[in-house]
Amino acid sequence: MGPSMTPTATVPLSPLLLRLSAAAAEAPRLKNPAATAAAAAGAVVRWPGGAARSRRRRCRAAVVEEAGAREDGVLLPKEGDEAAAAAAAAGRYDWKEEWYPLYLAKEVPDDAALPLTVFDRQLVLWRDGDGVLRCHQDRCPHRLAKLSEGQIVDGRLECLYHGWQFDGEGKCVKIPQLPEGGKIPRSACARKYEVRDSQGVVWVWMSDANPPDERKLPWFEPYARAGFTDLSTVHELPYDHSILLENLMDPAHVPISHDRTDWTAKREDAQPLFFDVTERTARGFAGYWGRTRTPHLRNLLRFQAPCVLTNTLQYTDKDGKDQCFSAQFLCRPAGQGKSMLIVRFGSTVRSPIAKVLPAWYLHQNACKVFEQDMGFLSSQNEVLLREQVPTRELYLNLRSSDTWVAEYRKWMDRAGHGMPYYFGHSSLAPPPVPAVVEQAPAGAVAGISASFPAKGGVGTVHAPNPTNRYFRHVVHCKGCRASVNKYTSLKNAFAVLAAAAVAASILAATRQWKAVLLAASAVLAAASYACDAVLSLITTNFIRTHRRL
């Protein structure tokens, strides 16, 4: 089930991982990887242009073609028709015949139902009385109420509308309104989806027609190694999963977008890159790339349908031991204009820095990295929806930076016709209804909504808003929620003690005691402020200094 090639790769997509692995990555002698070549598969659906195309787009396309000829290899070729034609006989791709990453298993609550979405399918994930993970359509067969708004009662999922209860198989086992002796209708059942807990990630099989294909269940060999430890987080993001994947497979943006994040990414490190595509299949692609200033460090990027991106660095340390760093990005389509990312950084060597820093600090740093990209990724999503043309009409893909972006969109050409919607390199099928990202309510409504706790979270000053860090990450992370509770309690306790020390100093009989109590109040006030600063780091979005008004 694992990849056919053993990758030899650094992970340039995360400044945090760079800091943890940079010292080890420079010294070792890299292994010599064996490249695997495979024929492309799938079929292309052409974008219907012609009369519908505007003169402005025709002019822009002509300018791009002319520039491509003039620049002599700077721009990537705009067509890959020969590979697509050769792959046309491979059959149609079906997005439902796949496993999708739902959640980190450790973050699934034991006593509450969790609403999740795959494309436009609404699901509910929960644990039964034995702790077994269960997944159903998030819809009560009675009157279509969301089962995720219900509760777990005696190991069964109860709909809070009329109290119907369902077991782990989706069978209705209780209807309070039935007369004595009445039988529960056979059709009173919730549709069940198969789930698996594999290496700490919950996966769901979405097929309507076929049983789960265990061969397609992603398996990551590094995570099965002895002594391998990882830092895994969940993030909900306000743009399409294809935009997210495109961003994650784009190492060229890291020095610019994440300049000085964790003292690793630097603007002056922006440079040409080299690429070598070694594998194209119906279910993804893989290849090597590197920086021209450090050509000895060859990186491998692997995309596996429908939404898995992997980067791994393997090397031999100074003691002759094989070591491994790995980053995995599991990008679930969570509806139009929304995505859910499970990001996992792991290593066979634990960095001393990672041992000292608390988990909430590493989590907030990951949030900061995604926030640095969020503004232009959201706007990119809007442009694609508004323009309604393939990416080759809009993107200027350079050979020295954008090879993986072009490869991904060309894979969309081969497989996108089997998805609910997609934007490919030279074809597309836009969603029937444009995505709408809800913003935080204003005024009195915001005050009311802020007084209620978030689903799976705690009551805070934040109104529900997918662009807010609290609702993008903290509500999905048990550790960060616990840290918010702890530091909120400490902040309030220190504030109360500081006030009490001030009051006591007023009543103190001697000047010495007054001085001691006032000093104690200052220390306690500083501690309260420090707790507030930690809360701000955990819950407040990153703001670029040059954008601050």
Image: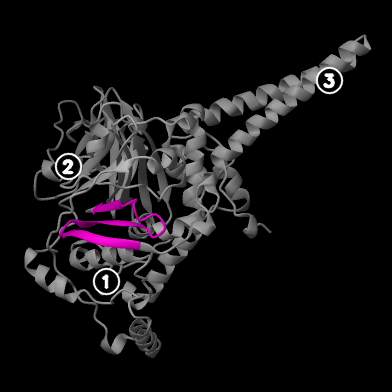
* Residue type beneath disc 1: Leu
Q: 10 Å neighbourhood of mark 3: few (<14), some, or many (≥20)?
A: many
Residues at marks 3 and 2, CA–CA distance in whole angstroms? 63 Å
Mark 2 or mark 1: whose residue is earlier in sequence: 2
Residues at marks 3 and 1, CA–CA distance in whole angstroms? 68 Å
* x and y, in percent, of residue 209 in the image: 9, 50
Query: Magenta stretch: residue 407 in it?
Result: no
Question: Can you tell which mark lies on residue 83?
Answer: none
Q: Can see residue 141?
A: yes
Q: 10 Å neighbourhood of mark 2: few (<14), some, or many (≥20)?
A: few
* Residue type beneath disc 2: Gly
Q: Which residues make up the magenta segment?
A: 274-303
Q: Are marks 3 and 2 in contact (CB under 8 Å)?
A: no
- Is residue 401 left or right of 122 when viewed as pictured? right
Q: Give the residue number, with chain letter if any, for mark 2.
A: 2
Q: Can see residue 454?
A: no
The image quadrant that residue 532 belongs to is top right
| Tally of numbered discs | 3
* Placement of the N terminus among the 4 image quadrants: top left
* Placement of the C terminus among the 4 image quadrants: bottom right
Q: Main secondary structure of the magenta part?
A: strand
Question: Can you tell which mark lies on residue 518?
Answer: 3
Q: Is residue 83 above or below residue 240?
A: below
Q: Dot 3: what SS?
A: helix
